[in-house]
Image (cartoon, rainbow, N blue to C red):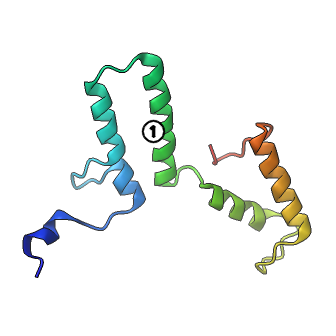
Amino acid sequence: SLGPIKDEYSLMSIDEIMNGKADGFIGLIPLVNAHLDSVEVDRPTRKQIDKYLDFVSKRASGELLTEASWIRQFVQNHPAYRHDSVISPEVNYDLLRAIERIIRGEYRPEGLY
């Protein structure tokens, strides 16, 4: 029997781990923010850190897509995709072109960033 140890842990989603739970678990991002509030961090650095933490928070909550989710959505919405789990050369080519444009900064898909 684990006894009191069982009360020390609980199953949580990545959103709950990163952003906290209503039952009192603060979450890692609010914990990092509290720490940053207590130490001296120059304004430009804090602004950049906040940008990163906001990005991680939104990814964890599902507000922003992961790369895998975006790729899946791209393929499923492609006019040449037949919903048969087969990625045709046309779909593959268009996907790789879209990824190349993202890397070059020429395309910024909604919901990814």
Q: Residue at x 36, y 43 (%)?
A: 29
Q: Which residue is mark 1?
A: 53
In the image, taking residue 70 as reference, residue 9 lies left or right, namely left
Q: Residue at x 64, y 48 (%)?
A: 112
Please tell me whether residue 35 is drawn above or below residue 82 in the rendered image.
Answer: above
Q: Residue at x 78, y 51 (%)?
A: 99
Q: Nearer the viewer, residue 22 or 51?
A: 51
**Residue 103 occupies quadrant:** top right
Number of numbered callouts drawn: 1
Image position, residue 91 (x, y; %): 86, 65
Q: Residue furthest left?
A: 3
Q: Residue furthest right?
A: 90
Please tell me whether residue 46 is drawn above or below residue 55 in the rendered image.
Answer: above
Q: Residue at x 69, y 65 (%)?
A: 72
Q: Amino acid at mark 1?
A: Leu
Q: Secondary structure at mark 1?
A: helix
In the image, taking residue 12 as reference, residue 62 lies left or right, namely right
Please tell me whether residue 38 is drawn above or below residue 61 in the rendered image.
Answer: above
Q: Residues within 10 Å of mark 1 (few under 14, many from 20)?
A: some
**Residue 8 occupies quadrant:** bottom left
Image position, residue 7 (x, y; %): 14, 67
Image position, residue 55 (x, y; %): 52, 41
